Image (spheres, grey):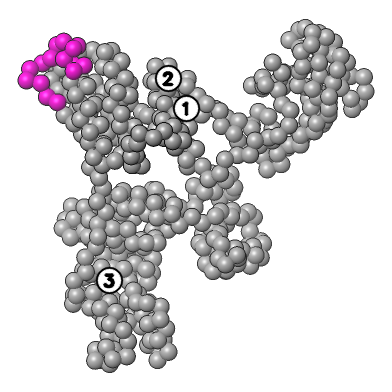
Amino acid sequence: MFLPNWPTDRLRRRRGTPGEAAILLVSVDHGRQVIAHCCPRSAACGVAPGLTLAHARALLSACPATIEAAHDPRRDEAALRSLAAWAIRYSPLVSPDPPDGLLLDVTGCHRLYRDEHRLLDAIGRELRRLGFTASLACAGTIGCAWAAARHGGTGVVVVLPGREREALGPLPVESLRVDRRIAEALHEVNVDRVGQVLALPRRELAARYPADLLRRIDQAVGDAVEMIEPLRPREPVMIERTFDGAATQLESLLIAGRELIDKAAAALAQIECGALRMTMRIARLGGEPAELELRLSRPSRDPRHLWSLLRPRLEAVNMHLGVEGMTLTVAAAQRLAHRQESSWIDRDSAAAAGERAWGELIDTLSHRLGADRAVCTRLVESHLPERSTRRVAAMDAAGSAKRSSAPATPVTGDRPSLLLERPEPIDAKATGPDGPPSAVRWRGVEHRLVAARGPHRLAEEWWRDEQRGVTREYFAVQDDAGRWLWIFRAVESGRWFIHGQWA
């Protein structure tokens, strides 16, 4: 059993704050903002879960920076399950132990590492490489390992078989995994350690306390059987087709490919999932196997759509001396909501059909033109025009939109329909120090201005170091050809730039 602490360096890097910044995860309890979790730096300053956010801020007043983020228990649960799936490399039986622990049945697995100490050291090194710190313990019972990991201090603890009572003796009674009320009742009679509980007669414990106390004691010392419910990852969908002899005709390759697609779609329908990424391995006689990869923007198990993406790739494969076999693997899949067929036309089914058609269009364009050429625009929280949007691959846009906590707010106001990628410097003839110019020279051509609107001032984003000291005054001006241009003056330097135009 090991107890990981979630890495905080990633959050510091993502927020762009220094390494000594304190991190607080905040939750709402009866209308109050309280601390759900805190980093070790915050804990060293006196912050603890349960404190109000205002109290925590007062304790961290001397800290150079503080990161406050909303606590989402569902994300913690999903992350713990992902970590449990990662730990299957060390044991086939792994179970999440919410909120922040994992249980591993390593019976027989330690022989691969010579002993339990080497096994725990290997797990600890990989966890540190991932950015986690953890307390690890190994014992003959789940209860003893749980108690040693959570209450036995930091580092690696190995309890030899038959030494469970000795290891549990100095630990607090909370390490028995009993209810809080049972622990408080034991504290009232000055029973604070497990060794004191084990010294009491079982008859008196059974008469005074609930049966859960004796059950937990028996599980911890090995007198009662306790099993874990292991995480059972779903096996990936894999369909294989082997030819009797080397196939040399393209038609045979296409027929086999369509057969694999149909079988994979049927297998995905049984588990109610859709493919997000598929790989096909083609074993060629006289050459290395060919690898084909299909990525989808949205989960799909439509054989027609999947075949339309795979067929052009198959037709371009060099068969060498012939193809001996083909293997289609669904490398990534996602759950699809059950959809009931209906003869009635409703808005939900029409919206789902439109979403599905949009995803198929993105998949087709991405595979034919390239994933880096099929892009879409996403809003970014910034009032500066060149930073208010960013281009992302259309293939990844759907997933990034689902992962984002909240969409960015669009900037209101009249902005040009055509925005230059970067502001271009221009020469301006100004009539006054603060007003718009009367003429501008852009790309070697002089334009006389006949109308102007503005100014509209945009200050720098003070939280970005590279934008300090840049304040812009924007004007919408019309030249003598009737074209409206969007220009601005850098207040600090007095230089003029053009940033876009209205089409």
* Left or right, residue 308 beside residue 391: left
Crowding at dot 1, Cα within 10 Å, few <14 / some 14-19 / many 20+, comes out as: many
**Foreground residue among 63 and 3:** 3
- Residue at the spot of label 3: 143
Q: Tell me where residue 359 appears, x and y as whole percent.
A: 42, 28
- Residue at the spot of label 1: 394
Residue 217 seen: no
Dot 2: what SS?
A: helix
Q: Which amino acid does label 3 sit on?
A: Gly
Distance from disc 3 to disc 1, alpha carbons, whole Å, reads 49 Å
Distance from disc 2 to disc 3, alpha carbons, whole Å, reads 55 Å
Q: What residue type is labelled 1?
A: Ala
Q: What residue type is labelled 2?
A: Leu
Q: CB of mark 2 within 8 Å of CB of mark 3?
A: no
For marks 3 and 1, the one nearer the N-term is 3
Q: Quadrant of residue 218?
A: bottom left
- Residue at the spot of label 2: 365
Dot 3: what SS?
A: helix
Please state, as top left, top right, bottom left or bottom right, where the N terminus lies in the image: bottom left
Q: Going 51% across and 42% down the picture, which residue do you hit?
A: 404
Q: Tell me where residue 363 appears, x and y as whole percent.
A: 40, 24
Q: Tell me where residue 485 appears, x and y as whole percent.
A: 76, 18
